[in-house]
Amino acid sequence: GRLYVNRAFRISAEKMFELLFTDSYFSRRFMNARKITGANCTSWQRDASGSMKRTLNYTITISNPLVGKYSTATENQTLYKESREGHYYLVDTEVYTHDVPYHDYFYTMNRYCIIRNSKRKCRLRIYTDVKYKKQPWGFVKSFITKNSWSGLEDYFRHLESELLEEEAELTQGSGDA
Ligand code: YK8
């Protein structure tokens, strides 16, 4: 896998969770910027193991010329019970892109870790891995992996820069910038 984001923000851990994992203005604006449309999502619900789960469905717009322009996607999110409100949040998201070539072979696993550094600061780490449901031929596998990494890199670089913008807006005028 790869570590795409590993950075401290002048944003509280609680606020970071809210930005990324609730129906926040930030997440809606970011989806618009990525041309992610038709998003609908279930509310967080506790499962038998004590963790919280929710599912998102949406349509993504793809810029890779090898792939059709759109794909529907399903994202299963798990907020692990080891999380501690305001202190530590561990969220895994499994993303299935249903309409891309070889979609029945792979999915993407993203791990978001939000750690409180102080009252108004946190560290965000996002770790990603491409997972295989069945083994494709070697060349197909490297093709899938290569194309996934480039799309993911673009996405998370954009997310990081939008979070930095948000940080600048939030700290503006708070007197501790
Ligand atoms: C989520 C991983 C692969 C996929 C894409 C497909 C290549 C097909 C390979 C062929 C287009 C928002 C990606 C990047 C689409 C976007 C997905 C996003 C960024 C040519 C063999 C969508 C996080 C996420 C996870 C997986 C990403 C797809 O929140 O290359």
Image (cartoon, rainbow, N blue to C red):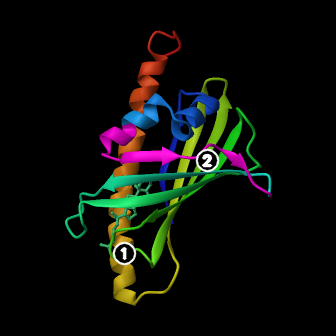
Q: What residue do we see at 65% from left, 40% from top? A: 115
Residue range highlighted in magenta: 30-48
- Toward the viewer: 38 or 75? 38
Q: Is mark 1 within 8 Å of ligand 1?
A: yes
Identify the secondary structure beneath mark 1.
helix
The relative height of residue 63 versus residue 157 in the rendered view (above or below) is below
Observer-side mark, 2 or 1, equals 1
Looking at the rendered structure, the kind of residue marked 2 is: Cys
First in sequence, mark 2 or 1: give its number.
2
Residue on which the image places disc 2? 113
- Quarter of image, ligand 1: bottom left
Residue 132: image location, x then y, percent = 50, 77
Q: What residue do we see at 61% from left, 24% from top? A: 120
Residue 167, magenta (yes or no): no
- Around disc 2, counting alpha carbons within 10 Å, would you say few (fewer than 14), some (14 to 19), or many (20 or more)? many
Please tell me the numbered disc located at residue 2.
none
